[in-house]
Image (tube, rainbow, N blue to C red):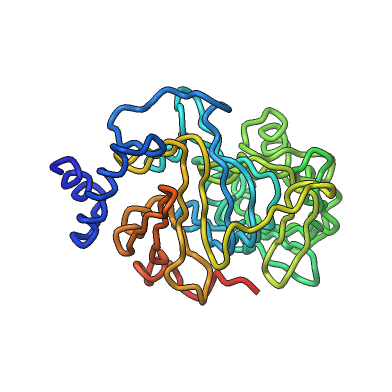
Amino acid sequence: MQFVRNLVSQLGISQSLLILLALFVLLCAATPGIVISQTPPTNETHEGTVQTQMRNVTFRFSDTVAVEIKSLNGVLVPLGKNEFPNFDDKDSFNLRVTTAEIAMDSSDLANVLNSYVFARPHSPLTQLSISVEKGLLKVKGKLHDKGDIPFETEGSLIPTADGKIRLHSEKIKAMHFPVKSLMDLFGIDLGSLIKEGKVLGVDAQEDDLILDLEQILPPPHLEGKVVSIRMEGEKIIQIFGSSDAKRVKNIRTGNYIAFKNNRIRLGKLVMNDTDLILIDMDPNDPLDFFLDHYREQLSAGYSKLTPDSGLHVYIKDYNKLHPAKASPGKMRFR
């Protein structure tokens, strides 16, 4: 019982959940499917991958970067010496996507480039902004190593054969004058950095830039193959998977994130033979989930044990916990 009180204190869970967690501990003692432990169990099957399904989720990678997941089927893959995914360590696992429909706002893509890809000191590109105009992606910024000369490119987004994203430049300008090619615009400095792999997640092929979502997005990193891209307003809609991928049945209705099989860790709670579903307390809009603040979201909700020893956790949207930080109303599905 003292352990449960310690767990409650660490996770910040409200006192009203104390009795439920106590019952949960008693159930775990009698049921081999779930264990609570402070020492990680050994990995036994499938390298510790945990199946996941997401429906209608705003998934925040950071304070400035988020994607909208309409649907996703895949697995959490533990990395390095980690035997299973740990929610308190975003570098402990990758999200390997089998099939998905994921949207990213053009402003979030700009935030990724500014905050991660070209965030190093004295980066050759600065103050990047991205918008969608007539189905084309328009990128504006400044060439820092050329005296902050303004530039802009306009092009289409198409998937590559290996599932990355190609920005095919159709119009290139610097100081409002046409430029012959992308590398003429960027010059030797950026061109060599890209060719040498020193700009993470970006490659160059003639006048095209190749973006690798697995590398440019913050952790937990996405692994997957983009098979098609379309624009809807300022949204960049990416379809992952393949044309012959089997349709996976939704395990329930509403907005949720589900985890199944193997092990997963949340604080000091370790589930063996995982059966965990995070359910939106407000079904009227997408589940707004921020891994950095999952404890706050869990403690603002409540939990239920299922007859087969699963756990359903009803959580509060992040943007309703921190509306000033979350910019409410920006991330909504059509």
| Residue 293: % across, % down | 36, 54
Q: Is residue 72 visible?
A: yes
Instruction: Point out the residue furthest to the left here.
Output: 2
Q: Is residue 119 visible?
A: no
Question: Relative to 231, does residue 272 appear above or below in the rendering?
Answer: above
Q: Quadrant of residue 4?
A: top left
Q: Is 104 situated left or right of 307 in this image?
A: right
Q: Is 296 situated left or right of 258 in this image?
A: left
Q: Nearer the viewer, residue 5 or 59?
A: 5
User: Residue sitting at 70 percent across and 44 percent down?
Assistant: 211
Q: Quadrant of residue 223?
A: top right
Q: Nearer the viewer, residue 309 or 87?
A: 309
Please state, as top left, top right, bottom left or bottom right, where the C terminus lies in the image.
bottom right
| Residue 206: % across, % down | 84, 41
User: Residue sitting at 31 percent across and 64 percent down?
Assistant: 300
Question: Relative to 161, does residue 324 appear above or below in the rendering?
Answer: below
Q: Nearer the viewer, residue 212 or 11?
A: 11
User: Residue sitting at 45 percent across and 57 percent down?
Assistant: 278
Please state, as top left, top right, bottom left or bottom right, where the N terminus lies in the image.
top left
| Residue 27: % across, % down | 30, 44
Question: Relative to 99, does residue 191 appear above or below in the rendering?
Answer: above
Q: Nearer the viewer, residue 9 or 66?
A: 9
Question: Relative to 212, does residue 84 appear above or below in the rendering?
Answer: above
| Residue 196: % across, % down | 68, 28
